[in-house]
Amino acid sequence: MAKADGEVTIKKYANRRLYNTGTSTYVTLEDLAKMVKRGEEFVVQDAKTGEDITHSVLTQIIFEQESKTGNTLLPISFLRQLISYYGDQMQMVVPSFLEHSMKAFSEQQTQMREQMTRAFGETPLSKNLQAPMQLMEEQVKRNTEMFHQAMQMFSPFLSPQPPKETKKAESKDIDELKEQLRNLQNKLDSL
């Protein structure tokens, strides 16, 4: 398997130990989590078979992070919805949608920090983005609602058709959400 520039290979042994071939040291899942946060690229391989097990190890890191802190990133409703897509026709669409959503979220967060710094300089407000993050949280909730509605539109034949009154109400709700997103974007742009 060709190795990308800067990508480290982590070998996972049968005894569950992880060996970083770049530093020639054993590492823990917490060490790998820190590498992810620093933006370091790595691939995890089964030491015996050479199989790429990066996905399962990253999932395990998420599980540990969710378990050890009281601050979970994945709400129960999201997890239930995600599980419901396994084996569904939409299963192929969900990964790319989530990837693009996280990329957009990250870019918006970076833009917001830059705008806050330009507008206010290095202040406690720009370092502690509590108020702007609440605005972002509201936007994420709206995006999640829109995602749920979009998934229902992609698979209308899987669920009974709602009455026409409900369709009009949903259309109105979507228009309201779009307007709220525009207003929120305008607020962020003005900052």
Image (cartoon, rainbow, N blue to C red):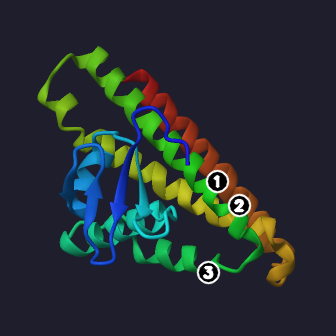
Q: Are marks 1 and 3 in contact (CB under 8 Å)?
A: no
Q: Residue at x 27, y 71 (%)?
A: 64
- Count neighbours of disc 2 (C-alpha within 10 A) and say few if under 14, some if 14 to 19, many if 20 or more: few
Where is residue 61? Give x, y as percent: 32, 65
Mark nearer the N terminus (2 vs 3): 3
Which of the two residues, 92 or 133, is positioned nearer the viewer here? 92
Residue 96's disc number: 1
Residue 99, relative to residue 92: is it above or below? above
Mark 1 residue type: Ser
Q: Residue at x 40, y 71 (%)?
A: 75
The residue that label 3 is drawn on is 84
Tell whether 143 sits left or right of 125. Answer: right
In this rendering, would 64 be left or right of 173? left
Q: State the separation of the CA atoms marked 1 and 2.
A: 6 Å
First in residue order: circle 1 vs circle 3: 3
Up the image or down, 90 lies above or below 126; here it is below
What is the quadrant of the C terminus in the image? Answer: top left
44 or 126: nearer the viewer: 44
Q: Amino acid at mark 2?
A: Val
Q: Secondary structure at mark 1?
A: helix
Q: Which of the 4 quarters of the picture holds residue 171? A: bottom right
Label 1 to label 3: alpha-carbon separation: 17 Å
**Quadrant location of residue 155?**
bottom right
Q: The residue under label 3 is which amino acid type?
A: Ser
The residue depicted at 35 percent of the width and 55 percent of the height is: 10
Q: Horizontally, is 179 left or right of 87 in the view?
A: left
Which residue was labeled with disc 2?
93
Give the residue at the far front of this rendering: 48
Local secondary structure at mark 2: loop
Identified at 52% across, 36% down, the residue is 183
